[in-house]
Amino acid sequence: MGFVEDLRFREFGAKCVYFDRFGGVSPPPFDSLNVSTTVGDKKENVLKNLEIVRETVKADKIALINQIHSNTIVEYDGKIHDADGIFTVKAGVFLGIKFADCTPIMFLDTKNGFIGAIHAGWRGTYLKISAKMVEFFIKKGSNPKDILISIGPHICKNCYEIKDDVAEKFDDRFIKESNGRIYLDLSEANIDQLINAGISKENIKDLSICTFEDKRFFSYRRDKTCGRNIGGVMLI
């Protein structure tokens, strides 16, 4: 099993990691660390895989949400809500985001010890879920200059082909045209939102891993039938 870690979070008593697809118990095409029960894998496999994740990050709990491509953000309360953002001040709770091309983005208030995690595909990005999470943090007492942000593995601007109806929702700065095809840059669209919400560019790190290009990760666009990766953040 492997994972990619944003080590900046360690300095402030937190962990931010994105797991690859290996080290779990699911059979092909969900091989092997699939964390979704809605793709065709057996529930018992998914529960075992989540337990592997929990033990690896040494979490007391993994907090998941039922991701619906919205801009809804909830505070962790032990239940599973329909949402695409989750927030907590509790230590030992790994806020998990499932992804297989959409963008997992992690937030940490380095002064007050708050964490947040969001799932941003084109819909969540269009609905400005990144900016909404920053607003949520500010309401809880954060100063934007204290917020660290990590952008995990997701489909990159060279691979994320979209149609006109989606392209027209976004500023031309985030759209690329090549050989008659149109592509969207999810990273830059979210970074732009974050900066406009008051986050300094120095506090934002894009890990620049493309799920479509990097076979270590599940990619819905590449494989259609596949598992889901998990990434998340936790206060230690």
Image (cartoon, rainbow, N blue to C red):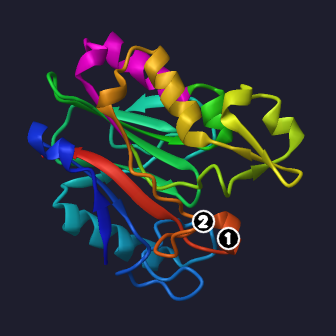
User: Bounds of the magenta span?
Assistant: 129-150
From the image, tell me which residue sits under label 1.
Answer: 222
* Placement of 128 over or under 50, stated as above or below: above
Is residue 111 shown to the viewer in this render?
yes
Which residue is drawn at the image coordinates 21% and 68% (left, top)?
56
Between 95 and 217, the residue placed more toward the observer is: 217
Q: Point out residue 214 in the picture as x, y percentages from the top left corner.
A: 51, 70
**Quarter that holds the N terminus:** bottom left
**CB atoms of marks 2 and 1 within 8 Å:** yes
Is residue 88 shown to the viewer in this render?
no
Which residue is drawn at the image coordinates 53% and 54% (left, top)?
154
Q: Point out residue 57 in the picture as x, y percentages from the top left corner.
A: 20, 61
Outermost residue toward the bottom in this view: 27
Q: Is residue 140 left or right of residue 165?
A: left
Q: How many labels does the image show?
A: 2
Determine if the magenta segment contains residue 204.
no
Please, what is the three-letter code of the amino acid marked with disc 1? Answer: Arg
Local crowd size for mark 2, using a 10 Å CA cut-off: few (<14), some (14–19), many (≥20): many
Residue 212: which numbered mark, if any?
Answer: 2
Outermost residue toward the front in this view: 179
N-terminal of the pair, mark 2 or mark 1, is 2
Q: In this view, does 28 lie to the left or right of 150?
A: right
Judging from the image, what secondary structure is the residue with disc 1 in? helix
Q: Quarter-wise, where is residue 171 in the image?
A: top right
* Placement of 93 over or under 155, stated as above or below: above
Determine if the magenta segment contains residue 145.
yes
Judging from the image, what secondary structure is the residue with disc 2 in? loop
Please, what is the three-letter code of the amino acid marked with disc 2? Answer: Phe
Q: In this view, does 8 lie to the left or right of 39?
A: left
Q: Point out residue 161 in the picture as x, y percentages from the top left corner.
A: 76, 53
Between 232 and 60, the residue placed more toward the observer is: 232
